[in-house]
Amino acid sequence: MISARSFFRSGAIRAGAALALAALPARAVALDGPECSHTITRQNLAACVLAAHPDLLVERSELPVLRARRSSASTLLPSNPVLAVTGSQRRASGPGGRSALEWSASLSQELELAGGRGRRIAAAEAELEAGREQVRASERASVAAGWAAFFRLLAARAELELSERLLSASERISRVARAKAEKAPAAAADADVVNAFTLQALRAKLQAEQALADAGAELGYLLGRDPSAAAPAVSGALEPLPVTEPSTLNPKALAAAPELRALAAEHSAASERAAALRRERVPNPTVSLFARRDDFDERVLGVGLTLPIPLPAPVGQTHAGQIAELEAHARRIEQQQRQAKARTQLALAHAAAALRSHRQFVEALPPAAQERAEQSLRNLGSELEAGHLTVREALSAQQALIELLRTHLDERRALCLASIELALAQGTLLARAGP
């Protein structure tokens, strides 16, 4: 199982995720079941991942908790009213003593006059905003992981097809080599060499099948399916996402980065919590109304005021330690913000350089040249049977052609993955990316 975060292979790329997917909507776009239950394409991949990724479902479940915390912070009164009722009967000692019934009732309410409620609401709102931005960041990282699994699946399928062609060519050369060995015992060594190459081709085919199964299971997990079930059907070309190579970062993309926005919200929440604790240093008065009947059968109505006496620390409670902790946490977040912005430029530079390098290699072998290399690989058996090549020459040519085709396929896969990393770094990863 590969999580969204484990997709990023280096610290620079992880920092680049701070600018991910500025073009994506803030909320997941859920597709109807039938659209995601059949073929996954470049058009519906992002929406299907956003609708069903198990990790995202867990992330989103945190938002109701933060909304409930925001609701709790908006309570008007700092505490509930207190109603106290007492009653007693007094009887004088001695014969003929008089008895009297006494009772009293009071209603008291604590009042908050320093404005701490507003600070608590602001802190809860900032925490909720931080949670929303973290969900957006997870959504965008999940889409990036979905694109990576999609491209790996396409590449694994192409690798399997190439391995099957290689195995077929090796078996054909092996048959010719065995036939020659039967006529000329001196050629037996060539037949053994060919058998070794055939076993390598078989091993490559089995590895390609394993890679295809792994990529299918990974994509199935990201789509909320059983990874042990059949791999999702995919359709699309192994082509990179449409990205450019900017020399500098777009300030708008930096401002819209969900990770940085989440850090800003966390900083605001810590500052508001500290301000709320400072407001709590101001004592809350308690106002009370009372009524009483005493033994003289007199009824008394009155108003009372209770005011706590604040004492300095460490004798009294001033929240000094909690305030210092929150302020230190806010300063730490400021450092994290500066670090994230600096590492973002580094991630952009690394991703752009990787994309440029892989694109140059892929363009060095145009489709026409690739077709000629594949045709030459298919013709090796015929050339060997016609006597135009020796067994050793055919094997050498086969190895060179296979190495070229495999390297080209690896570079195409790397180019696609590099386009995802660059799109994350510059904040332009698209929900739809071409046909």
Image: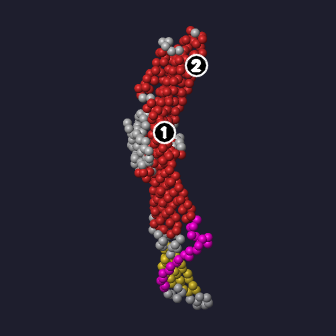
Local packing at callout 1 (Cα closer than 10 Å; few below 14, some 14-19, many 20+) is some
Residue 240 drawn at (x, y percent): 43, 37
Residue sitting farthest toward the front = 247
Amino acid residing under circle 1:
Ala
Q: Residue at x 48, y 82 (%)?
A: 302
Give the total of numbered labels.
Answer: 2
Whether residue 5 appears in this view of the structure is no
For the point 49% across and 24% down, the residue is 401
- Where residue 255 sits: x, y (%)? 43, 53
Range of residues picked out in magenta? 299-321
Nearer to me, 231 or 17: 17
* Above or below: residue 400 compared with residue 383: below
Residue drawn where x is 51% and y is 15% of the image:
389
Name the residue carrying label 1. 354
Tell me, yes or no, if residue 203 can be seen here.
Answer: yes
How much space separates mark 1 and mark 2, taking CA atoms? 38 Å
According to the picture, the residue beneath numbered tag 2 turns out to be: 193
